[in-house]
Image (tube, rainbow, N blue to C red):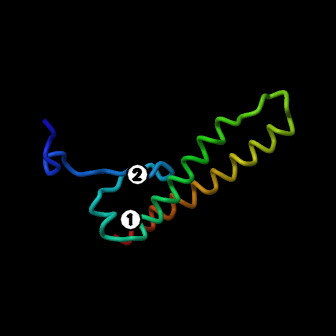
């Protein structure tokens, strides 16, 4: 037997880049949060793809480019984290 949706408790969505969980009510309250969540999903998929493409340590040039890409992903994460903090400060 399926549980009634009201008995499942609050729905939480995790923004991986910021390491925070936000409730469904917060998503409904401000459409900017949808944009932030979409950017977070793109960032998360990019990180997964980046990790799967790690070159062998013997390929120094490839390793440098891969590490530079990782640094850019970290900068994106910082920007998303700041946006999540700014959003939560406004709410």
Using the rendered view, name the quadrant where residue 84 is placed.
Answer: bottom left
The residue carrying pointer 2 sits among few (fewer than 14), some (14 to 19) or many (20 or more) residues within 10 Å by Cα, namely few
Quadrant where the C terminus is found in the figure = bottom left
The residue carrying pointer 1 sits among few (fewer than 14), some (14 to 19) or many (20 or more) residues within 10 Å by Cα, namely few
- Tell me what residue is drawn at x 85 percent, y 32 percent: 59
Using the rendered view, name the quadrant where residue 89 is placed.
Answer: bottom left
Percent x, y for residue 30? Answer: 35, 71
Of mark 2 and mark 1, the one earlier in the sequence is: 2
SS assignment at label 1: helix
SS assignment at label 2: strand
- Residue identifier under label 2: 20
Identify whether 53 is placed above or below 5. Answer: above
| Left or right of residue 2: residue 53 | right
Percent x, y for residue 88? Answer: 38, 65
| Left or right of residue 28: residue 37 | right
Q: Residue furthest front?
A: 1
- Asked if marks 2 and 1 touch (Cβ < 8 Å), the reply is yes
- Residue identifier under label 1: 88
Q: CA distance from mark 2 to mark 1?
A: 10 Å
């Amino acid at each position: 037997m399926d549980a009634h949706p009201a008995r499942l408790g609050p729905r939480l969505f995790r923004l991986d880049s910021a390491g925070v969980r936000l409730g469904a009510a917060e998503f409904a309250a401000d459409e900017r949060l949808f944009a932030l969540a979409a950017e977070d999903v793109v960032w998360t998929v990019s990180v997964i793809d980046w990790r799967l493409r790690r070159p062998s340590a013997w390929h120094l040039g490839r390793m440098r480019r891969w590490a530079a890409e990782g640094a850019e992903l970290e900068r994106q994460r910082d920007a998303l984290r700041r946006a999540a903090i700014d959003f939560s400060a406004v709410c």
